[in-house]
Image (tube, rainbow, N blue to C red):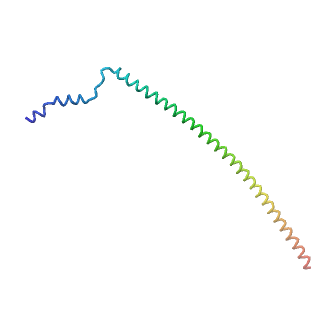
Amino acid sequence: MMAGHLEKPDTRNCKRTRELEPQMPDSPQLSSLGKSDSSFSESSGLFYKDEALEKDLNDMSKEINLMLSTYAKILSERAAVDASYIDEIDGLFKEANTIENFLIQKRELLRQRFTVIANTLHR
């Protein structure tokens, strides 16, 4: 008797599952009209938000570009100042090298003179 009960389908359970399933509307055009109205209002709101976001992004992009160009200008000025310092230091090194060579020549000239004076005195 239990086996017969298991083989027999329960129609009440089938009806309940059908009732729980979402019902498809009879006219798809009516449901799409309702959705398009709400979709339109949502999309227009999104469109406005997109425009505002786009404007904000463009404004930020302009500000960032302005900051970057200002930063590049500052770096360029600093590079020019650094180059002038390097030129000045290079000039100082050349001058120091010239003075060093002059002093070396002067020392050699003085050695030669002292040698001549010392040889004259020893005679």
In percent of the image, x 71 and y 50: which residue is there? 81
Q: x and y percent of residue 59 in the render?
A: 57, 36
Q: In what quadrant of the picture does the N terminus appear?
A: top left
Left or right of residue 98: residue 18? left
Q: Residue furthest left?
A: 1
Q: x and y percent of residue 45 in the render?
A: 46, 29
In percent of the image, x 73 and y 53: which residue is there? 85
Q: In what quadrant of the picture does the C terminus appear?
A: bottom right
Name above or below for residue 109 compared with residue 59. below
Q: Count the marks: how many?
A: 0
Left or right of residue 123: residue 81? left
Taking depth in this image into account, of 72 and 26 the one nearest to the observer is: 26
In percent of the image, x 54 and y 35: which residue is there? 56
Q: x and y percent of residue 83 in the render?
A: 71, 50
Q: x and y percent of residue 47 in the render?
A: 48, 29
Taking depth in this image into account, of 82 and 32 the one nearest to the observer is: 32
Which of the 4 image quadrants contains residue 22? top left
Taking depth in this image into account, of 29 and 94 the one nearest to the observer is: 29
Name above or below for residue 122 compared with residue 99. below
Q: Residue furthest bottom?
A: 122
Left or right of residue 58: residue 29? left
Which of the 4 image quadrants contains residue 41? top left
In percent of the image, x 41 and y 24: which residue is there? 37
